[in-house]
Amino acid sequence: MAAVEARNALDHVVVVMFENRSFDNLLGRLYQPGEVAAFEGVVGKNLGNPIPEWAEHGAHRLVVPYGVSPTMNTPWPDPGEELPHINTQLFGILDDGNRGVLQPEKSFNSPDYPTQQPTMDGFLTDYLSTFIAEFRRQPTYDEYAQYMTGYTPEQMPVLSTVARGFATFDHWFCDVPSCTFPNRSFFHAGTSSGYVVNMSPPESFVAHNTAETLFDRLESNGLTWKVYCDPPSHYSLTGLIHAPRLRGRFATHFFSTDQFFEDAEKGELPTYAFIEPQIIGHAHNDMHPAYGMLTPGLTWDPPSSLIGGEDLLARLYEAVRSSSSPTGSNYLNTTLIVTFDEHGGTYDHVAPPAAAPPHASAPAGQFGFAFDRSGVRIPTLAISAWIPERTVVTEEYRATSVISTMRERWSLGNPFTDRDATARSLSSIFTLDTPRAQADWPDVVARPVEPMPESLLPMDAPINGLGKALLGGVLALGKGMGVAVPELSPDAVISGAEAIAMGQELLGDLFPAMRS
């Protein structure tokens, strides 16, 4: 094997991005006070959220303290994650008329920012409001108290073992205080083209998100990249989000994770690899909270997506750890980054900081949002032979730090936007003079993933607005690429099974290499 140094740690970068968890939710109990020099966790702190006075059950208790999750499927139902919900969570603002409204369209609970700073005391208020919107009743105390919980290292053995074995970032923030698509777009482009929510309108990202991506910049500099999606995924969210830029690469650069494991073993990983868990499908392993109320008709939650995600993470980690090719990629020159797209409405106690708008002169985006503040803190780890165990990185990082890192490592040119221009690079975290041998990397053992109960597979209930938006985006993509797609009226009633079949039929043709 060729000699390498710490500067080679970023020769190959592998990123796996899970879904919708805050730092407190999964890693807040990673270290006890005094166990490491500094760690911004939850142990030893008096954390909680006030119960809104209009709660019909348990309001006399005044506060729900932050506790330990009683099951591997909390919170259930899924919290709100769009900008109006996160405004409530962070600033405690719930505008008149927005209580019990799932998708506020006129008022967005917006703060007077920067005069008004996040108080982190509206998570519970938003959860109760979102619950009412879906169930048309008030939740009981137990139904909302389970929301104010997070996991212990014993409950998340793979994530916690890897975190303690390498580097944990305890001030890593997502870039947008909103949902999946804008945050994933920022991750690779430093902007979301002004969009704040997923596929609203349906053609938003798939037709109009024309921003240059990290993939473009790598390719123009003669470097390689691949996107790998865990089976049985038939499509890639990354591909959909950046379709105007990447649709010509769907057949050549998007693969199943089966191909990733083969590439890692042979030493053939690209310069940059991005991995998507199974996000939409039976027994999703993306660590997303149980979809529950937000996707009626798509009954695929049990078993726990956390357990499924831990199993996937263990396999990815072992693939990097065991890679020993004498040429190409191997464990000495490959860094694995584990991160999440956004907090998904789960509780975190650290107020997000201000952030540079992507383009200072650009008008405000959707909902009048100026993109001048970060999203919530999310779990992020870096695994490399050049990182000491029990490393806690306390400086502020954000999702666009990956763009910043890749630009620096490969001399990729000017920043994409003002956002990645101000994001800190990861280059300083590789501090060892001598790399850690594979035998010194911690062993991980994932719990068995239970099979999906057959009783949950039928999906004959109609999908709701969120499901229709996702389907609409898929159809808009196909139409834009010249594929014949069905025309659906706004009031069309479509079952979950019908929606899945339509999506898989179309996207299976668009991403042929993902069928393996």
Image (cartoon, rainbow, N blue to C red):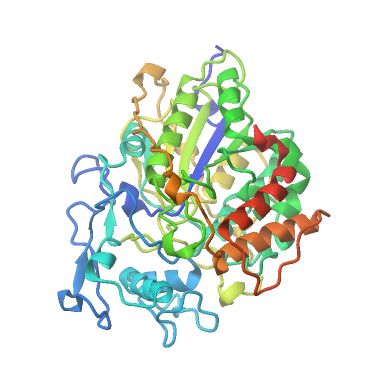
Task: Give the x, y percent position of residue 171.
Answer: 38, 52
The image shows residue 140, relative to residue 245, as above or below, that is: below
Q: In this view, which residue lies farthest toward the right?
A: 482
Q: Nearest the camera: 488 or 157?
A: 488
Q: Residue at x 67, y 63 (%)?
A: 472
Q: Position of residue 242 (x, y in %)?
A: 68, 53
Quadrant for the N terminus in the image? top right
From the viewer's side, name the closer residue of 439 and 124: 124
Left or right of residue 365: residue 100: left
Which of the pair 379/80 is nearer the observer? 80
Q: Quadrant of residue 252?
A: top right
How many numbered tags mark residues here?
A: 0
**Residue 145, image x, y percentages:** 25, 65
User: Quick one: 282 or 433, which is closer to the camera?
Assistant: 282
Query: Can residue 229 be seen in this snapshot?
Result: yes
As drawn, which residue projects farthest toward the bottom?
A: 96
Image: 112 above or below 448? below
Asked whether residue 354 appears in the rendered view, the answer is: no
The quadrant in which the C terminus is found is top right
Q: Vertical placement of 38 versus 311: above or below?
A: below
Q: Residue at x 68, y 54 (%)?
A: 502
Q: Which residue appears at 59% of the width and 23% of the height?
A: 262
Residue 328 percent location from the top left of the image: 61, 20
69 left or right, relative to 187: left
Does 118 sit above or below residue 479? Answer: below
Residue 115 sits in which quadrant?
A: bottom left
